């Protein structure tokens, strides 16, 4: 029997079949021996042991897999941040976008809480990220604004919902999948950050062929497998200026006659994005020394 893993908790995997039957399965010992870990989103062969239980026998070939959140066969990531309250951490946001590019997974950027953000803030957010080639959507989960646009983006795809805690991911899930019953948290008054409510990764079928996965919130991401000299290639808005710099090998940091730095100074490239690029460049360069 073939099915898809939609949930995994403590070694128990919920597998859904094409005819919508669900089985709680354990992975055979051969997986540990071969150092294979089944992931949410995996298509698997499994054997049925009873009306509700089974064993995973084989993980079928993956088209991709993500490390954080741990999942497979993903079409896109819907990255959710709050436009305000809490203030968006742009460094964290850019790290996530870079890692999605690294793993060849397209990303859609969603800013929630547009109802409490002023127009200037929304304009700046759009300018900062639309030039990076990412689709940007503004919504208000509280007022149910923009949710139909989200539904259109999700249609027919397997999407991972990701972002820091306290930005409205679980509330969005409850609008999109009201029967799923996701727990909703609140902001911590002491630290101004969200309290994590999602503790495991789970795929929810919104309709036939459309899956959405809520994942635990994150507060940090480390860039892995990227050389500091390659970092500029993960900022698409830099690309039109690469061949206009004095040096072909320009890293757009301290070199003279740098077209990217000129574009930043003239407002054609986001200053926020460029400053994050400089921080990440130094981080990767210092890591490279060791």
Image (tube, rainbow, N blue to C red):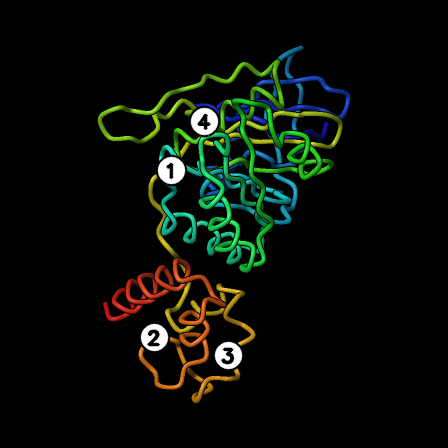
Circles 1 and 3: CB atoms closer than 8 Å? no
Residue 183 in the image: state x and y as whole percent: 46, 16
User: Which mark sits nearer the N-terminus, 1 or 3?
Assistant: 1
Q: Quadrant of the N terminus?
A: top right
**Real-space Cα distance between discs 4 and 3?**
42 Å
Give the residue pinned by disc 1. 218
Quarter of the figure with residue 200: top left
Residue pictured at 73% horizontal, 25% vertical: 207
Residue 118 in the image: state x and y as whole percent: 45, 38
Circle 1: element type: loop
**Real-space Cα distance between discs 3 and 2?**
13 Å
Q: Nearer the viewer, residue 6 or 28?
A: 6
Disc 3: CA contacts within 10 A as few (<14), some (14-19) or many (>=20): many
Q: Which mark is residue 200?
A: 4
Q: Which mark is residue 253?
A: 2
Residue pictured at 50% horizontal, 30% vertical: 115
The image shows residue 76, relative to residue 48, as above or below, that is: below
Give the residue pinned by disc 3. 242
User: Which mark sits nearer the N-terminus, 2 or 4?
Assistant: 4
**Real-space Cα distance between discs 1 and 3?**
33 Å
Quarter of the figure with residue 178: top right
């Amino acid at each position: 029997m073939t099915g898809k893993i939609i949930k995994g908790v403590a070694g128990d995997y919920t597998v859904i079949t094409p005819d919508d039957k669900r089985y709680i399965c354990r992975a055979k010992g051969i997986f540990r021996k071969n150092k294979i870990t089944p992931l949410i989103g995996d298509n698997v062969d499994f054997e049925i042991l009873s009306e509700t239980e089974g064993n995973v026998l084989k993980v079928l070939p993956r088209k991709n897999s993500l490390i954080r959140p741990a999942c497979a066969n993903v079409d896109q990531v819907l990255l959710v941040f709050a436009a305000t309250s809490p203030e968006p951490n742009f460094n964290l946001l850019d790290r996530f976008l870079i890692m999605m590019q690294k793993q060849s997974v397209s990303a859609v950027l969603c800013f929630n809480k547009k109802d409490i953000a002023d127009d200037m803030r929304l304009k700046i957010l759009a300018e900062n990220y639309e030039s990076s080639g990412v689709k940007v959507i503004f919504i208000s989960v509280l007022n149910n604004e923009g949710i139909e646009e989200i539904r259109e983006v999700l249609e027919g795809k397997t999407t991972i919902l990701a972002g820091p805690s306290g930005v409205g991911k679980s509330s969005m899930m409850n609008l999109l999948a009201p029967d799923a019953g996701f727990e909703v948290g609140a902001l911590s008054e002491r630290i101004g950050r969200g309290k994590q409510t999602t503790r495991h990764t789970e795929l929810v079928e919104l309709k036939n062929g459309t899956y959405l996965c809520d994942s635990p919130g994150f507060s940090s991401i480390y860039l892995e497998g990227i050389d500091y000299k390659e970092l500029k290639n993960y900022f698409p808005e830099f690309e039109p200026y690469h061949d206009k710099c004095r040096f072909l090998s320009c890293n757009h940091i301290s070199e003279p006659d740098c077209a990217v730095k000129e574009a930043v100074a003239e407002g054609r490239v986001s200053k926020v994005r460029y400053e994050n690029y400089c921080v990440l460049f130094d981080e990767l360069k210092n890591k490279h020394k060791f």
